Image (cartoon, rainbow, N blue to C red):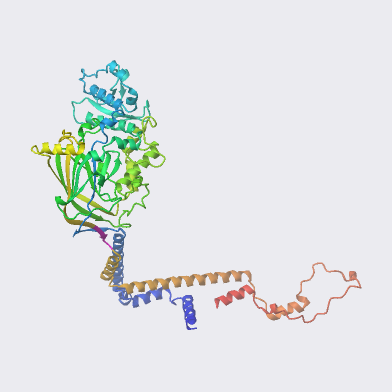
Amino acid sequence: MNLKKYFIRALHRLQKGPGYTYKELLVWYCDNTNTHGPKRIIKEGPKKKFIWFFLTLLFASLVFWQWGILINTYLSYSVTSSLSIGFKTMKFPAVTVCNANPFKYSEVKHLLKELDELIEAALERILQPTEGDTISPLPLNISQTLDLELWNQIPLVLIDEHDKDHPVIVDIFETNQTGPGNQTAAPPVTSNTTSEGKKYKLAVKLCSHQGADDCIYRNFTSAAQAVTEWYILQSTSILSKVPLQERIRMGYQAEDMILACLYGAEPCNYKNFTQIYHPDHGNCYIFNWGMDEEALNSSNPGAEFGLKLILDISQQDYIPYLSSAAGARLMLHQQKSFPFLKDQGIYAMAGTETSIGVLVDELERMGYPYSDCTMNGSDVPVENLYSEYNTSYSIQACLRSCFQNRMVEICGCGHYMFPLPEGVNFCNNEDNPGWAYCYSSLRSSIRDRQFCIDSCKETCNDTQYKMTISMADWPSEASEDWIFHILSYERDLSTNVTLDRNGIIKLNIYFQEYNYRTISESAATTIVWLLSNLGGQFGFWMGGSVLCIIEFGEIIIDSVWITIINIISWCKGLKQKRARARYPDAPPTVSELVEAHTNLGFQHEDSSPIPRNEIHLNEALPPEPGTPPPNYDSLRVQPLDVLDLDSDAE
């Protein structure tokens, strides 16, 4: 019962309102608030009242300005970075080693035979001496021995820049004399060269389809760069049609490439490596990847407790126009992550012993809303094409997957260097004649690159390996004879020396020390920081506290209730005015209503009365007037709707 009475009183209080006018409420607040300034406004004289009103308004504006800055700073979600150094036993990184040359030339020579003949003829054409200011024609017998169908798909052209305002494009394999009829005016070409003496420039011509006028020219400062780029595009088209298992067979096998292995004091061999196929480097081998077994821990820092490898890269079997660098490509990375050697790998030179000291940096980023990083890539709107390897998410995998998806969407096929989405084929010159033009346009498109950058996210937690690299000749001249004899015998079971320093590489990979650095992010502004600074500004400028804010909230609520009660009263008054407009005269009294029922004089007369002589004798006379039965509705002195309005007003 007490609870019911309490709620009834509270409801009555809400219906009644604060009981002040706006002026009375404002005076009451200024007289009772704990905030400095408002009290002086109502208690001082006219001049001081104006001064205190101005000061109070000024400092209140400063408080709100400072609050806006603090809230905006808090909502920016800035972070601070801290560096800590720890010491612990660490997992040895995964080590990926590849040959700089993806395939053995002896295995792919039959596939690249026509391509090699074309490039050799093109080099003869490029390197032949010029006669005056003209380019001599290609001998007819040479052009007849070449199959120019492959050449015409992605040709190399010479750009004649004798007249820089009107450059002329000359086909390298033009059989007639160079003349106006065989020359094509070049579109504006951006030149990277600054040499005034160079009059000819080699470029790759890429067209949307064969014979089309919609072409672009990729020019280079050196013919060596142009030849390498052209050969990569043409070989990509050829190798994309070769099945994966055949490509793996044509690459370097683990038992031929890994001659010796030692981890700490434990011997190892090629069977301790996991083989993957990498489009840039062919067969690659990963030590300590952690896919099938637990990752290995390093027992101690130092070169004696790391990984030691001896590799044979077989440089004599390199593809001459595809791989211009010789050596091993290697990379250190986390377990269960895909190695992107083209971006993060390093080279180890043949005939040397390369020592790599490793330091570990652990990065810990804060997630949303402090940064746009991801924990596992599940919130990234890009299909990860590298998930077929069961590897973890990385920004490199996302960017390449995004590019491949864009290429499939725009060009209708996938690039050979990236994994394929389901149901899509690799690009080649026969099925997709304009793929190289589409690929080059897409790769140079800033809009498409920015689209992939905006779609992909960094990982919140990452481990980076900082390397200190040193090299020395290996083996020395004094020891190379017996070392090459032993290694040749162990690999080929032959007493003849089959190895030389042009193909041998020794690697030492180890932790320099067990100290690791952790770079972690923390929130620069927290809710405690925000509240303390808001209170500090309010207290400094206005001498207020949290209770003063509650008082201000109370006056706002009271003002709202006064407004609501005034609106309700106005609506009731408007309703009463409309009701009075329907009944302009005073309502009849009770006696008038009763007399209206009993006195015939109050009844309305018929407009056409019947003459007395027409009344039939047999018709009954009207009844005598008398007192009718009581009609309780007639006792009301006002209409029902007017009574309702009066009761509401009370």
Using the rendered image of the protein, determine whether residue 446 is visible from the camera's viewpoint. Answer: yes
- Residue 80: x and y in percent read 24, 59
Q: Is residue 472 above or below residue 596?
A: above
**Where's residue 179, x and y in %?**
29, 17
Drawn side of residue 589 relative to residue 332, left or right: right
* Residue 628 placement, left or right of 342: right
In the image shown, does 315 or 263 lie closer to the viewer? Answer: 263
Is residue 177 visible in this depiction of the protein? Answer: no
Residue 522 position within the rendered picture, expressed as x and y whole percent measured from the top left? 26, 60
What residue span does the magenta drawing correspond to? 520-525
User: What is the tally of numbered marks visible in this picture?
Assistant: 0
Observer-nearest residue: 216 or 626? Answer: 216
Residue closer to the observer: 593 or 302: 302
**Which residue ends up furthest to the bottom in the rendered image?**
2
Q: Main secondary structure of the magenta part?
A: strand
Residue 407 lies in magenta, yes or no?
no
